[in-house]
Amino acid sequence: MSKLHTLVAFAAAALVAGTAIADNNAGPGPGPGQRPDAARFREHMEKHRARLHDKLQLAADQEAAWQVFTEKTKPQPPRARAVKSELAALPAPARMDRMVALFKEREARMIERAAAVKEFYAVLKPEQQKVFDRMTVWPRKKH
């Protein structure tokens, strides 16, 4: 099955299950499919990046690569939630096409992020690579 077919099948299943777009206003706190508070997320990411930077013990000649890496992998601003109402207003075939386009946009961002990780990883020494591997695994463990 091709990537496109897999994405369409996933999107169709999500649509049928009623989980294509989660309601960000349902109940207290973020639930499954909901975005946490953007400011709190950014703060958490910055703290994690600072810990990662400290643990990597970068040499002076690696700092420029770190700056490029952090710039290229910054969290994206949250997407407008108007997508939910936009999708609801579309007929099912057009809604599926729009969902596929959104998946493709996300895939493109992930490909760019992967390239940035590979670029930075290449300048790390083997012991630094181990630290990077350990601190960037998901779900994160305490370090």
Image (cartoon, rainbow, N blue to C red):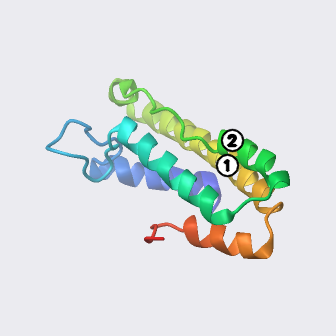
Image quadrant holding the N terminus, namely bottom right
In percent of width and height, residue 51 lies at 54, 58
The amino acid beneath tag 1 is Arg
In percent of width and height, residue 101 lies at 57, 36
* Disc marking residue 113: 1
- Work out whether 91 lies above or below 109: above
**Cα distance, mark 1 to mark 2?**
7 Å
- Work out whether 23 lies above or below 130: above
Asked which secondary structure carries label 1, the reply is helix
| Residue 22 falls left or right of residue 25 | right
Residue name at image x 57 percent, y 43 percent: 106
Q: Which of 99 and 83 is in front in this view?
A: 83
Is there CB contact under 8 Å for labels 1 and 2? yes
| Residue 41 falls left or right of residue 6 | left
Residue name at image x 35 percent, y 43 percent: 35
| Residue 67 falls left or right of residue 97 | right
Q: Reading the chain from its start, which is encountered first: label 1 or label 2?
A: 2
The amino acid beneath tag 2 is Lys
Q: Nearer the viewer, residue 46 or 95?
A: 46
Residue name at image x 43 percent, y 49 percent: 44
Query: Which residue sits furthest left?
Result: 27
Give the residue at mark 2. 72
Asked which secondary structure carries label 2, the reply is helix
